[in-house]
Image: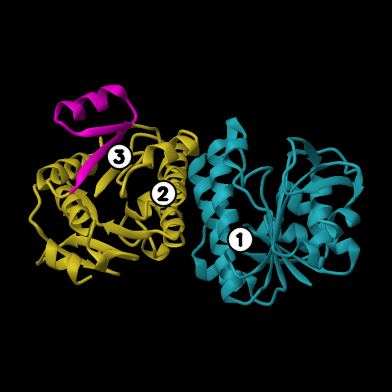
Chain colours: A yellow, B cyan
Amino acid sequence: MKVLVAGANGQIGKQLVDILKQGGEHTPVAMVRKQEQADAFSEKGIETVLADLEAPAADLEKAVIGHDAVVFAAGSGGSTGSDKTLLIDLDGAGKLIEAAEKQGVQRFIMVSALQAHHRENWNENLLPYYAAKHYADKELERSGLDYTIIRPGGLLNKPGTGKVSAAENLERGSIPREDVAKVIAASLTEKHTYKRSFDLVSGEISIEEAVRSI
Amino acid sequence: MKVLVAGANGQIGKQLVDILKQGGEHTPVAMVRKQEQADAFSEKGIETVLADLEAPAADLEKAVIGHDAVVFAAGSGGSTGSDKTLLIDLDGAGKLIEAAEKQGVQRFIMVSALQAHHRENWNENLLPYYAAKHYADKELERSGLDYTIIRPGGLLNKPGTGKVSAAENLERGSIPREDVAKVIAASLTEKHTYKRSFDLVSGEISIEEAVRSI
């Protein structure tokens, strides 16, 4: 699969692109906003597409053309306000979902957040962010796409363990970003994950088994 | 109809409650956050429900019980940030839509914003607000409710003229809040407005005719 990674310059996105590149099975394409970001990927032999999630929907349609899958690993991040949460985490995702639908890119993986589907379990300190993720996920679930919504717990920068717990509802927990990236990579062609949404934290089961048995 | 007005203390909501009360055909119930707001409505002989759009979904379910219609005329307003836009304009609306569905309150009128359905026409200065309205409207359109989404142009505090233009797509324009409130009131039992969404600005046609011919 040729996989467009939105948010390729982010902490999960960078690792995902590397994992896909090293795996050899898929071709990652880094979607980034700035030329210097594109240059850094190009130097590593990775294809790039310049596109901004705040750009008009037509630009994002152009960006997805020719891909077999889209991964939304983007996020406005903690350093910007809720303006950007609305325009990137919610509407950026919404535009990319519409772009995939219009251009027939059937496979779409969303990086969401643990329990985003259950309002009563949203992280008290991140309510606006969770609201944006909740509605972006709903858009994707109601699309005609072969979606997978991965809802990781607290993201860590530790090396991955390769062992996870994945289920529709999990208690709060954490997980290294590297393991989230590996779960995305392992899910891409794993049909069990199509039209499915699941929480994800560190656990006892190998990633391959986790995505096969979800 | 017994009509729950969310945002009854707002500029459109207050006029809507008065219009419904004076019309005599429907019974308005003012949904407000604070006891002193409730007291002010009670003094005018208007029923009230204390409920906060930021409260848990279960509280909003209780609030809608016993009503025949819900009007979402609420908004976080220009004095708060996009945090509140996400939690009130988007998720407050989402919770109230779910509450109406769960409690079988079949009629739901949403006050949205001109061209909220067309991203390319969003007001440049209000993009985050428009994003929130866009997705709240989509939630409502995909609900099983008899919805009407009214998308007024620039809101004025002038007295209403009683003459409007209503259509799926209109050029930018403005409209007195009083006329928006009158259009809501006239739409409540007008079947032509069920499962419909329309832009609304001041125009040449009487409100009664406009909602009949939409």
Q: Secondary structure at mark 3?
A: loop
Q: Is residue B173 left or right of residue A64?
A: right
Q: Secondary structure at mark 2?
A: helix
What amino acid is found at the position of numbered circle 3 in the picture? Gly
The CA span between labels 3 and 2 is 16 Å
Q: Is residue A75 left or right of residue A94?
A: left
Residue A7's label in the rendered image is: 3
Image coordinates for residue A130, horizontal then vertical, percent:
39, 53
B89 over B146 or under it: above or below: above
Residue B65's label in the rendered image is: none
Q: Is-magenta flag for residue A178?
A: no
Q: To which residue does mark 1 refer?
A: B141
Q: Chain of mark 1?
A: B
Residue A111 makes an appearance in the image = no
Quarter of the image with the N terminus of chain B in it: bottom right
- Asked if the residue at tag 2 contacts the one at tag 1, i.e. Cβ–Cβ closer than 8 Å, the answer is no
Question: Could you classify mark 3 by the number of other residues whose Cα lies within 10 Å: few (under 14), some (14-19), or many (20 or more)?
Answer: many
- Residue at the extreme front of the image, as rendered: A66
Image coordinates for residue B205, horizontal then vertical, percent:
91, 47
Residue A100's label in the rendered image is: 2
A156 over B45 or under it: above or below: above
